Image (cartoon, rainbow, N blue to C red):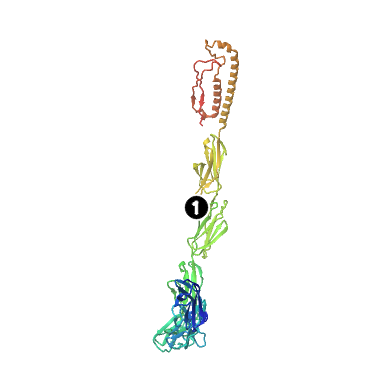
């Protein structure tokens, strides 16, 4: 018994789109192939939106799910699953749309309400399933319905409250439902209409004034606001002007408010009656005529010197009968000065401030505009100084000056001068600063500043401040320059182009570490250092550094000094070389002559070699003696020593013993014993 599923299909009768209320059938069909004709039992399961809605068991390959009355809630995706003898097959899903929604039901908790009370409405779709949206409509006669929609995700009804407003008499309400199907909104029919009658809890209030017209400043004016109410409980009457509450009463039908009229009382007044959520208002415009204009305060001077006389006069145009007073404004309260229309006073700096006058007629007090009085003390002579303290500046560095005037009433105007040119104008209370960034080396113009305020004494000028400009560069030279003889004197000169005295000059030799050789403080722009004796180890680079109270080191470029051998030493060496060459020539000549003579006497001498001893004769000249060379050297050294001066005369004299070995018997006569030759070797300083 072998079988297999060919297909499983699902279909809808009469169609996939069914009208709400019409019958609908969901049919599931299984197409199966069998090896033989045998009986199978089929388990059919139908799902809607993946939720089980129908199950049945059949011996045939068909199953039918009947819905006698289709509702909008039956809209959804349907799918059929068939199981037979451990084999299961499902159909493709099919979407069914039940068009149209049932008519909602609307109910109201009240049919008769007062203005301000709340009506609670309930709209229900009993045959529909959430999510749904309920829309309520409030319909007034001769007006567009006011619609409010409320979404409901979990219930098939919604409740909404409406307030009965002022002017509502007969209200009509209805509602409808709405749902979303495949991203399209579908609305139900409108519900039944519900009527609600609205009654006034009180009448619109009445607002009056006494007197009703021709209100003038100083008159007593009384406001009255009244109404008629259904229930006295919780009723409130409020009187306002420009959103400011002037008076209010509760649980009463009448409000009274009295005041003395002023110009500020002109304007719109509002009487409001409230009870619960109901509110009614009445407006009234009040005009108050002016009794007299505001006074005017006139000052004889608004800017005056200390100890001058000031006159303040208070007046009213075309009005004389008033009580005047003059006051000075103060943050903690105005200070009365005199109860009169005129005030004379000799002022001090402390009298600077704002003054007003007041006028009173029939209890109405009016105030003038304030008048500002400024009293000035003269400025003191300003002092001009450098911010760093010393009147010195390095070329390329900015110079900041401070002009300070201790005395005088601010504000003060400060002017800075460089020479006769105004560089900057500053307005400040006590001091001002000026930054000069254009410093030149030949800039020797003096600086000054002046200060003034509104005092009649005019301008005060500071003393002239001269500023010394220190150059950026220093220079170093030497005499002689470049090459210097060993043992000679050398002068080093370090100078700056400009700088304030005293200046510290320091001389250095450039090595792996800076070596200070000499330093000197000079009240000049240069300093000289004499080095008495230059030696070979003094060869190298030299530089100098200059500094003063500005605490800025100015360094020169390095110079190179080469110490060479002295001229006289070169002469001595040359003489020694020449003498050596001459001596070598004489020795060669002697040896040549001796060689020649020895050839003639060789045979005679050879026979007597074993029996005779050779004796050297002082006069025969056939032997070497260094006495002539030494004598010549001594004479040359003496002449050289005389040219050396006292330094070489004090040199030590050393004597050295020289041993002369015997001559070759084949070449020269043999001399017995040892000769001692004395030579002078003088020690030089170097």
Determine whether the residue tagged by mark 1 lies in a helix, strand or loop.
loop
The answer to which image quadrant residue 481 occupies is top right
Q: Please say whether residue 72 is visible from this viewpoint.
A: yes
Q: Which residue is mark 1?
A: 390
Note whether 594 is above or below 89 in the view shown: above
Seen from the viewer's position, the closer of residues 490 and 128 is 128
Note whether 676 is above or below 683 in the view shown: above
Q: Residue furthest front?
A: 36
Q: Residues within 10 Å of mark 1 (few under 14, many from 20)?
A: few
Q: Position of residue 350 (x, y in %)?
A: 45, 67
The answer to which image quadrant residue 478 occupies is top right
Image side of residue 464 versus residue 118, left or right: right
Q: Position of residue 616 (x, y in %)?
A: 54, 14
Q: Position of residue 96 (x, y in %)?
A: 50, 78
Q: Please say whether residue 291 is visible from this viewpoint.
A: no
Give the total of numbered labels: 1
Seen from the viewer's position, the closer of residues 466 and 555 is 555
Q: Position of residue 291 (x, y in %)?
A: 49, 83
The answer to which image quadrant residue 42 occupies is bottom left
Seen from the viewer's position, the closer of residues 475 and 270 is 270
Note whether 58 is above or below 430 in the view shown: below
Seen from the viewer's position, the closer of residues 486 and 359 is 486
């Amino acid at each position: 018994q072998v079988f297999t599923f060919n297909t499983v299909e699902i279909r809808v009768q009469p169609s996939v789109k069914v009208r709400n209320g019409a019958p609908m059938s969901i049919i599931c069909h299984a197409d199966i192939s069998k090896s033989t004709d045998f009986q199978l039992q089929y388990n059919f399961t139908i799902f809607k939106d993946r939720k089980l809605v129908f199950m049945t068991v059949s011996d045939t390959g068909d199953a039918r799910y009947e819905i006698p009355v289709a509702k909008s809630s039956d809209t959804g995706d349907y799918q059929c699953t068939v199981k037979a003898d451990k084999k299961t097959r499902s159909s493709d899903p099919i979407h069914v749309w039940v068009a149209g929604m049932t008519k909602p039901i609307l109910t109201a908790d009240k049919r008769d309400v007062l203005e301000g009370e709340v009506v609670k409405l309930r709209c229900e779709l009993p045959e529909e399933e959430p999510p749904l949206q309920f829309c309520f409509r409030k319909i007034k006669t001769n007006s567009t319905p006011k619609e409010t929609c409320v979404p409901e995700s979990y219930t098939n009804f919604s409740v909404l409250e409406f307030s009965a407003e002022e002017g509502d008499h007969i209200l009509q309400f209805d509602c409808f439902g709405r749902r979303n199907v495949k991203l399209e909104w579908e609305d139900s029919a409108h519900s039944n209409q519900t009527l609600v009658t609205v009654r006034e809890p009180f009448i619109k209030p009445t607002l009056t004034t006494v007197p009703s017209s021709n209100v003038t400043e100083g008159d007593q004016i009384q406001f009255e606001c009244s109404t008629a109410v259904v229930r006295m409980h919780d009723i409130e009457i409020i009187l306002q002007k420009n959103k400011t509450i002037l008076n209010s009463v509760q649980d009463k039908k009448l409000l009274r408010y009295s005041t003395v009229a002023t110009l500020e009382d002109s304007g719109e007044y509002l009487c409001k009656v409230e009870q619960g959520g109901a509110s009614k208002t009445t407006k009234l415009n009040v005009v108050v005529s002016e009794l007299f204009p505001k006074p005017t305060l006139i000052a004889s001077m608004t800017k005056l010197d200390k100890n001058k006389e000031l006159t303040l006069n208070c007046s009213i145009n075309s009005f004389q009968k008033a009580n005047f007073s003059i006051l000075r404004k103060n943050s903690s309260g105005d200070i009365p000065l005199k109860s009169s229309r005129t005030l004379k006073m000799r002022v001090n700096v402390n009298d600077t401030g704002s003054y007003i006058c007041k006028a009173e007629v029939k209890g109405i007090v009016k105030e003038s505009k304030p008048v500002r009085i400024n009293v000035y003390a003269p400025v003191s002579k300003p002092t001009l100084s450098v911010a760093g303290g010393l009147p010195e500046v390095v070329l390329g560095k900015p110079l900041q000056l401070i002009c300070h005037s201790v005395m005088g009433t601010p504000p003060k105007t400060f002017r800075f001068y460089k020479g006769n040119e105004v560089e900057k104008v500053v307005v400040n209370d006590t001091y001002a600063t000026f930054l000069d960034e254009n410093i030149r080396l030949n800039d020797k113009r003096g600086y000054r500043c002046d200060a003034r305020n509104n005092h009649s004494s005019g301008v005060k000028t500071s003393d002239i401040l001269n500023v010394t400009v220190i150059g950026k560069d220093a220079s170093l030279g030497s005499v002689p320059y470049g090459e210097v003889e060993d043992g000679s004197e050398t002068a080093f000169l370090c100078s700056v182009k400009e700088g304030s005295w005293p200046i510290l000059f320091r001389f250095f030799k450039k090595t792996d570490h800076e070596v200070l050789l000499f330093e000197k403080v000079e009240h000049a722009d240069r300093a000289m250092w004499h080095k008495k004796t230059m030696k070979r180890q003094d060869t190298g680079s030299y530089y100098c550094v200059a500094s003063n109270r500005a605490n800025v080191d100015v360094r020169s470029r390095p110079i190179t000094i080469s110490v060479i051998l002295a001229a006289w030493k070169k002469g001595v060496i040359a003489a020694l070389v020449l003498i050596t060459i001459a001596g070598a020539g004489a020795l060669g000549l002697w040896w040549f002559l001796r060689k020649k003579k020895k050839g003639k006497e060789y045979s005679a001498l050879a026979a007597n070699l074993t029996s005779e001893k050779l004796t050297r004769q002082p006069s025969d000249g056939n032997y070497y003696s260094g006495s002539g060379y030494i004598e010549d050297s001594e004479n040359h050294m003496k002449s050289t020593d005389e040219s050396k001066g006292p330094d070489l005369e004090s040199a030590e004299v050393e004597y050295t013993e020289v041993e002369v070995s015997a001559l070759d018997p084949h070449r020269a006569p043999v001399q017995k014993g040892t000769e001692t030759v004395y030579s002078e070797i003088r020690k030089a300083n170097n």
